[in-house]
């Protein structure tokens, strides 16, 4: 076996890759960009391109409103598939709805209602902004206190670092399972357990986990979770998110947005709101069916590929990036912004460099490589094992090395674009 820095390595790994054939099930343009940003927006599955077209023509076009007799159950059916195949939950505990931000609001608000005597909400000061803002808004609206805790910027939250902040006034602790910047995987089991010992509830954000790393919500006794579908589940830009509520909590929580899709008898048009029994009570209004079709296809593809196989490939890909960083990039001023231990790392690698922004621009505009930039000095290289090849990843790293060696990035301004 050759080492990661040898030119033959990537081809060898691709030849041995059991998931290689899945790449053909995605729309990948010949000579198109080397795509290292599936952690932000997954690629388009071919079946979605066709499926959404067929849905429009055959179902919307021909069935018209009669289609609802089938469409009405889709959010729950796809939720069950996510539950069973991707996040270690049971049927009836997951449903597809709204956005991650809105789902976090719904779950956090209902969790606060379950613990009315408690006044504290804890999150990570480095958590994804929408998570912090949603919790901040809720804290202000309800007279609660939000604690933004500081953790190690690479390793993220740990049970040991959280412990001193826990007491019996904590209502909710909410973290991302995989850190959006460093890619660190939090110890879901230990943190959930520590929060339960003081009687609080946990809400995990699975945006960078679902379809990227194994998740076992039931095994970790997780109370609540949210996650998106347009990253590693390849459902399409803005596709609806999902939420999870542990079975025994489902009928004890009442979410704050009382829409008709969450009503016990949706079409009897009752005078008063009565939440549905079961996970449907977390729905609000009419779902976006065109996008839901993308979720259906994306989730089915991931379920077919199998979580065990894509975790093994994800580790091999990120290990290759880390090895190439050490061999080629460290001498050029890069450092690793992700955990070194693959067991603690999700499916992207953060590379840090003082000129990260300009290097990222040069990669996109001069080298046809698409990673993304995160403040202040991080370039993220996301690998989606279902379609990312070793050759593509190796080539992307090689072009990164060239951009820095040849100082191509110096042609680009230091000002940030509106979207990074
Ligand atoms: C991508 C991401 C989100 C996105 O939330 P939206 O409501 O879909 O915009 C939320 N949280 C985390 C941790 C994310 O990575």
Image (cartoon, grey):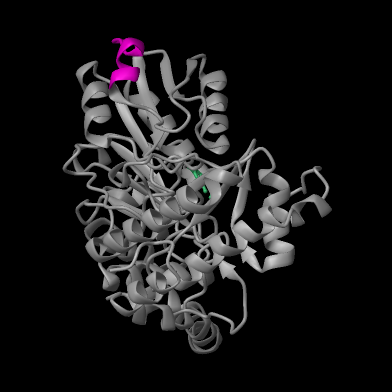
Is residue 46 positioned above or below 314 on the image? below
Dominant SS of magenta comes to helix
Q: Which residue lies furthest to the left in this view?
A: 219
Is residue 256 positioned above or below 147 on the image? below
Which image quadrant is residue 168 in?
top left
* Residue at image point 44% right, 62% down: 5
* Residue at image point 62% right, 81% down: 31
Front-most of residues 170 and 352: 352
Question: Start and end of the magenta stretch?
Answer: 160-169
Q: Quadrant of the N terminus?
A: bottom left
Which image quadrant is residue 4 in?
bottom left
* Residue at image point 37% right, 24% down: 172
Q: Where is residue 47 in the image (x, y as percent from the top left)?
A: 44, 82
Task: Inspect this view and state whether residue 383 appears.
Answer: yes
Task: Inspect this view and state whether residue 293 appears.
Answer: no
- In the rendered structure, does residue 57 fall within the stretch colored magenta? no
Front-most of residues 257 and 190: 190
Front-most of residues 322 and 154: 322
* Residue at image point 54% right, 55% down: 40
Is residue 261 positioned above or below 343 on the image? below
Q: In this view, does 237 lie to the left or right of 261?
A: right
Q: Where is residue 10 in the image (x, y as percent from the top left)?
A: 40, 71
Q: Where is residue 215 in the image (x, y as percent from the top left)?
A: 27, 49
């Amino acid at each position: 076996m050759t080492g990661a820095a040898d030119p033959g390595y990537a081809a060898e790994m691709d030849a041995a890759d059991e998931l290689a054939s899945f790449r053909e099930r995605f729309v990948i343009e010949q000579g198109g960009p080397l795509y290292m940003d599936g952690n932000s927006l997954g690629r388009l599955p071919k079946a979605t391109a066709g499926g959404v077209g067929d849905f429009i023509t055959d179902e919307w076009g021909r069935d018209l409103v009669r289609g609802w007799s089938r469409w009405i159950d889709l959010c729950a059916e796809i939720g069950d598939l996510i539950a069973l195949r991707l996040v270690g939950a049971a049927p009836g505990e997951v449903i597809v709805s709204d956005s991650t931000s809105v789902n976090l609001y719904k779950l956090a608000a209902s969790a606060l209602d379950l613990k009315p005597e408690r006044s504290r909400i804890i999150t990570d000061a480095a958590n994804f902004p929408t998570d912090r803002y949603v919790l901040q808004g809720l804290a202000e609206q309800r007279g609660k206190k939000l604690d933004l805790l500081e953790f190690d910027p690479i390793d993220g939250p740990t049970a040991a670092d959280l412990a001193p902040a826990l007491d019996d006034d904590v209502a909710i602790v909410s973290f991302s399972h995989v850190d959006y910047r460093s890619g660190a995987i939090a110890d879901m089991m230990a943190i959930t357990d520590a929060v339960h010992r003081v009687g609080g509830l946990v809400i995990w954000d699975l945006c960078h986990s679902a379809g990227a790393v194994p998740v076992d919500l039931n095994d970790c006794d997780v109370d609540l979770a949210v996650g998106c579908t347009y990253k590693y589940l390849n459902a399409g830009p803005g596709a609806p998110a999902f939420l999870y509520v542990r079975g025994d909590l489902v009928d004890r929580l009442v979410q704050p947005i009382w829409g008709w899709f969450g009503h016990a008898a949706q079409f009897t048009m009752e005078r008063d709101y009565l939440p549905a029994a079961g996970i449907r009570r977390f729905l609000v209004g009419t779902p976006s069916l065109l996008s839901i079709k993308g979720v259906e296809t994306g989730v089915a593809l991931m379920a077919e590929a199998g979580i065990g196989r894509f975790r093994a490939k994800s580790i091999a890909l990120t290990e290759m990036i880390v090895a190439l960083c050490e061999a080629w990039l460290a001498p050029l001023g890069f450092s690793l912004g992700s955990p070194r231990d693959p067991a603690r790392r999700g499916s992207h690698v953060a590379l840090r460099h003082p000129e990260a922004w300009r290097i990222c621009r040069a990669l996109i505009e001069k080298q046809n490589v698409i990673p993304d930039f995160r403040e202040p000095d991080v370039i993220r290289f996301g690998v989606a094992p279902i379609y990312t090849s070793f050759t593509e990843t190796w080539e992307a790293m090689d072009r990164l090395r060239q951009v820095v060696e040849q100082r191509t990035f110096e042609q680009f301004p230091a000002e940030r674009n509106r979207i990074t």
